[in-house]
Amino acid sequence: MREWSSEERDGLLRRIAPDVKLGRHVRIYAFVNLYGCEIGDESSIGAFVEIQKGAKIGARCKIQSHTFICEGVTIEDEVFVGHNVSFINDLYPRATAEDGRVQTERDWKVIPTLVKQGAAIGSGAVLLGGITGRGRWSVQGRS
């Protein structure tokens, strides 16, 4: 039976789509799901993180495990995002449209979120769409 190095095993447990733009020296751990997003230089993406299309992560950011970053989220440079943080880009999520058909992307509008440079977001925070970080180097607990 073949023995795998830890780096080889981690590589098998990542899903990074070909349309992801990765900066230099980005660290990505196992069990991530990245597609259509941008990750800046020297950032770290923890295990069990999903980053959706259109999301942008700046340089030297630290995204801890079990975090969900959806379309419409921009995170500037040097931001810390704690464990199990969730961003929400739809203030009125529904499975179906008013006429009863399953909703598609045409049926709702992405509500953008901006996290300013150097901010820190505490573990377990849920951030609703439409917010802008309180400013550079701010700290956000549960919202």
Image (cartoon, grey):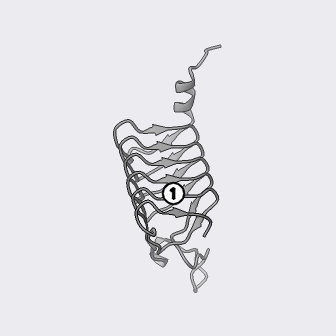
135 vs 68, left or right, is left
Quadrant assignment, res 22: top left
- Which percent across, then down, holds residue 71? 46, 63
Q: Residue at x 38, y 35 (%)?
A: 25
Q: Residue furthest top?
A: 1
**Eyeballing the image, is 103 above or below 76?**
below
- Which percent across, then down, holds residue 32? 54, 44
Q: Can you say which quadrant of the picture contains the N terminus?
A: top right
Q: Residue under circle 1?
A: 120
- Callout 1 amino acid: Ala
Nearer to me, 82 or 55: 82
Q: Can you say which quadrant of the picture contains the C terminus?
A: bottom right
- Which percent across, then down, holds residue 90? 53, 74
Quadrant assignment, res 87: bottom right
109 vs 31, left or right, is left
Quadrant assignment, res 94: bottom right
Q: Residue furthest bottom?
A: 98
Report helix, strand or loop for mark 1. strand
Q: How crowded is the residue under tag 1: few (<14 C-alpha within 10 Å), some, or many (20+)?
A: many
**Eyeballing the image, is 73 above or below 7?**
below
Number of numbered discs overlaid on the protein picture: 1
**Eyeballing the image, is 91 above or below 29?**
below
Q: Residue at x 43, y 57 (%)?
A: 53
- Which percent across, then down, holds residue 7? 52, 26
24 vs 109, left or right, is left
